[in-house]
Image (cartoon, grey):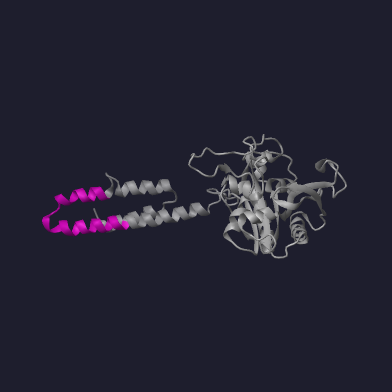
Amino acid sequence: MDINSLKTQIDADIEKIDSPAALEEVRVKYLGRKGLIAQLTSSIPGLPQEQRKTFGQEVNELKARILSLLDEKQKSIAGKKELSPSYSDISLPGLAQDLGHLHPITQITNEICAIFSRMGFIIIEGPEVETEYNNFTGLNIPLEHPSRDVFDTFYLNTPKSNTQKLLLRSHTSPVQIRVMKSRKPPLAVVVPGRVYRPDAVDASHSFMFHQIEGFMVDEGIKFSHLKGVLEVFAKSVFGEDIKMRFRPHFFPFTEPSAEVDISCAICRGKGCSSCGRKGWLEILGAGMIHPNVFKHVGYDPKKYTGFAFGMGVDRIAMLKFGINDIRLFYENDLRFLKQF
């Protein structure tokens, strides 16, 4: 069989290839087990001894040439497929990966912390398992206070050798005690975190929710400083036209104490179903830190004064976003969460 004439035939056959099927047909014709290359190889033993080496080299070169030409043709066909409108519709949108985003509670927590950070507060977190002293005694909450009852606090089983009872903190205020015991004034701190209370779950209550505690301690801190800080916070979250008022209240760890309301963001203080027709919405509790708290942490109450405030992040988020059921935050329903 003439090798040169075979090369011409191979070039012509490969030139005609226009599809993967035709490519495979030519490959089998020349390189298959019964193809022409196999036939040439099997004919070598029948040749005279002096021709075998030269003919074998020519067959190997021919095989390498066929492989190279078929590889180039395959790449050419693949390129045409990618560009062919009939092969793929490049106008179709891509398969985008769904990206997660921050939970609305986390978004509000970050927003609030950022507001206070701009006013010079630092952010400190504390443990969710606390001692009874830090959660109650150090904050001037007496033994007979209802919140210390086993029906109002999640107490933990601890060994009898423990000198302090342990519990799931019922507010973020214990971090006040931890920080003031370890640092000296001036202090300006906000404390975000989860808290726990054995409340029956309904539209406005949950056994686990989120709080942000804030406090400032130094010489000469006054109630007017507290009002100024909270006014900046309220207007930053709810808008510049929001009004704020302080109502006298009682908290064991502050004196004087107050509850803070803002004008309803929906009706602008005129009265609607969201604010119970009152025109006001409660957002947090606050007051001047009680002298007994300073005594528990070793501060001189005659030298230092300070204020503290605490807010429910879940409630702030509900007011800001117009949500009427706290349980929506924890049901992991993407139809709800994707709105934020």
Q: Main secondary structure of the magenta part?
A: helix
Residue positioned 66% across, 44% down in the render: 142
Part of the protein shown in magenta: 37-65
The question of residue 48 being in magenta is answered with yes
Measuring from the top left, give residue 216's x and y in whole percent: 68, 60
Q: Nearer the viewer, residue 218 or 104?
A: 218
In the picture, measured across the screen, residue 24 lies left or right of residue 61, that is right
Q: Nearer the viewer, residue 61 or 225?
A: 225
In the picture, measured across the screen, residue 245 lies left or right of residue 73, that is right
Q: Nearer the viewer, residue 115 or 163?
A: 163
Please determine whether, in this image, residue 124 is positioned above or below residue 136: below
Is residue 333 something one can see in this rendering?
no
The question of residue 247 being in magenta is answered with no
Measuring from the top left, give residue 160's x and y in whole percent: 49, 39
Measuring from the top left, give residue 203's x and y in whole percent: 71, 37
In the picture, measured across the screen, residue 260 lies left or right of residue 180, that is right
Quadrant for residue 241, please give it: bottom right
How many numbered circles does the render carry? 0
Residue positioned 62% across, 45% down in the render: 195
Q: Nearer the viewer, residue 175 or 300?
A: 300
Measuring from the top left, give residue 50's x and y in whole percent: 12, 58
Residue positioned 28% across, 59% down in the render: 4
Q: Residue furthest right?
A: 270
Residue positioned 65% across, 41% down in the render: 143
Quadrant for residue 299, please give it: bottom right
Q: Residue furthest left?
A: 49
Please determine whether, in this image, residue 230 is positioned above or below residue 198: below
Is residue 202 something one can see in this rendering?
yes
